[in-house]
Image (cartoon, rainbow, N blue to C red):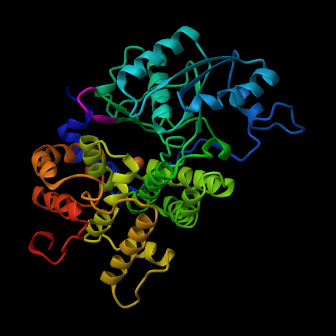
Amino acid sequence: MTYWTHEYLLRTWGGPMVQAEFLRDISKPFFTPRIFSGFNLFLEMPQLMPDAVDLVARECRSKRAFIVTDEYAQRFAPKVRSPYEKRHNIKFEMWAKAQPDAPIDTVRDCAAQIRKFEPDLIFALGGGSAMDTAKAAWLLYEHPGVKIEILSPLVPLNLRNKAKLVAIPTTSGTGSEVSGIAVISFPDGVKLPIGGALPEFVPDFALLDPTFTVGMPPALTAGTGGDALAHAIDGFMAPKSDELNQAIAVKAIQMIFEWLPRACADGDDIMPRMKMQQAAMMAGMPLANAGSGISHALGHTIGGLFHIHHGVMVLLFIPYELQVYSRATDRHLELCDALGVRDPDSEEKSLIQLIEKIRNLMIGLNLPISLKDAGVSMSDLEEKLGIILRQTPTDPAFYFGWYDLTEVQLKDIFLCAHEGRLLDLQSDMWR
Ligand SMILES: [Fe+2]
């Protein structure tokens, strides 16, 4: 199948140009939803002042709302819908069949159910896959004829003629609750990001209730938290990232270093849950507004081929991203300052200490720092290296970065990553 990401001009010229550092001050859009965070977002009793329930209900013009969720997160649906039913007489319908990686067939099924009910408001309740399913199904509800696979970012989506979108995350990592992107998977294994010319997929509201993330198992907490850390670093380092994006990214990174180990240690401790939920949302903002990085391109390919958790894979490639980008920018030194690992006498040593700091966090969370530790054997890697080297450069996260990698350099990254060995930046291929 042909996807918009295969478009030659977009890959070689359009993508890098849109993300270029020298263009960032010409036009500076920064999109976010209206955000509520806390324990009191779904109160059944009317309040003295208008609250989140009132503000969200106001968007629902004829009082029909549709919840898109999955088998796990549907347990939170009664808490979500009850105040709207009782206080604003809103009718609800629910579809709870969202699947991991948002397969296109489930998106179409969801859209068909939404079309039957004709809601004015769509609640996306769940992790990244449920939220992405809701976004794409919303698009098909508004425009049934759209061909998602060829929907390039140059095409406006023209949403919000029939409904608006409220995102309620139940994991802390994806950032989909603040992003203008949905990632949909296709039967041939391709995970396709779709978004449109303007980030119309940015939800109208993001409602963050930390009780919805309580009890997540340590491995899932670590993996999703790793995704959030990769988002913040990607968003900080992206060529287009400016002071606004970087300020949010740095705070998110500091929060993740402080709170992720505690969230993994005790899944029922509510404070680390709340801080991680906020940090993941904050990390999603620079990712959505400034762009992704090669960690995501490399992680998408390996994660897709070997069925390894997205967050685990993208964080594993962050040290390599920092090394590669250090050939083109010294921006990572600001991260060294923020995390207290800057060596005043040596930029090289500062970079190594930053990578060590990140890897120590990963080791403490039982996350792999090499592909070998993640369960990928060298023979499997070598067998699939041809596909890996062909597929990775077609990922938009690859061609929006700082550095146009050659095939030899790309191969070196994958082979080093297998052992957890860092790149030799003094070798001929990296000079
Ligand atoms: Fe991610």
Residue at the spot x=45%, y=34% of the render? 129
Q: Residue 257, percent across and down?
A: 52, 66
Apparent side of residue 152 relative to residue 112 in the rendered image (left or right): left
Q: Which residues are magenta?
A: 187-192
Q: Tell me which corner region of the image, top left, top right, bottom left or bottom right, holds residue 79.
A: top right
Please name whichever residue, 140 or 154, is drawn nearer the observer in this view of the structure: 140
Q: Residue 184, percent across and down?
A: 37, 31
Please name whichever residue, 115 or 24, is drawn nearer the observer in this view of the structure: 115
Residue at the spot x=60%, y=46% of the render? 215
Apparent side of residue 222 relative to residue 317 in the rendered image (left or right): right
Callout count: 0
Does residue 264 sit above or below 159 in this rendering? Answer: below
In what quadrant of the picture does the C terminus appear?
Answer: bottom left
Q: Residue 26, percent across and down?
A: 42, 54
Residue 6 visible at all:
yes
Residue at the spot x=19%, y=40% of the render? 9
In what quadrant of the picture does the N terminus appear?
Answer: top left
Apparent side of residue 46 relative to residue 17 in the rendered image (left or right): right
Q: Residue 303, percent across and down?
A: 29, 45
Kindly give the residue lying farthest to the top in the view shown: 116
Q: Tell me which corner region of the image, top left, top right, bottom left or bottom right, holds residue 391.
A: top left
Q: Main secondary structure of the magenta part?
A: loop
Apparent side of residue 138 relative to residue 8 in the rendered image (left or right): right
Q: Indicate whether residue 335 is drawn in magenta.
A: no
Residue 331 visible at all:
no
Kindly give the residue lying farthest to the right in the view shown: 48
Q: Tell me which corner region of the image, top left, top right, bottom left or bottom right, holds residue 41.
A: top right
Does residue 250 sit above or below 351 in this rendering? Answer: above
Does residue 416 sit above or below 162 in this rendering? Answer: below
Q: Indicate whether residue 191 is drawn in magenta.
A: yes
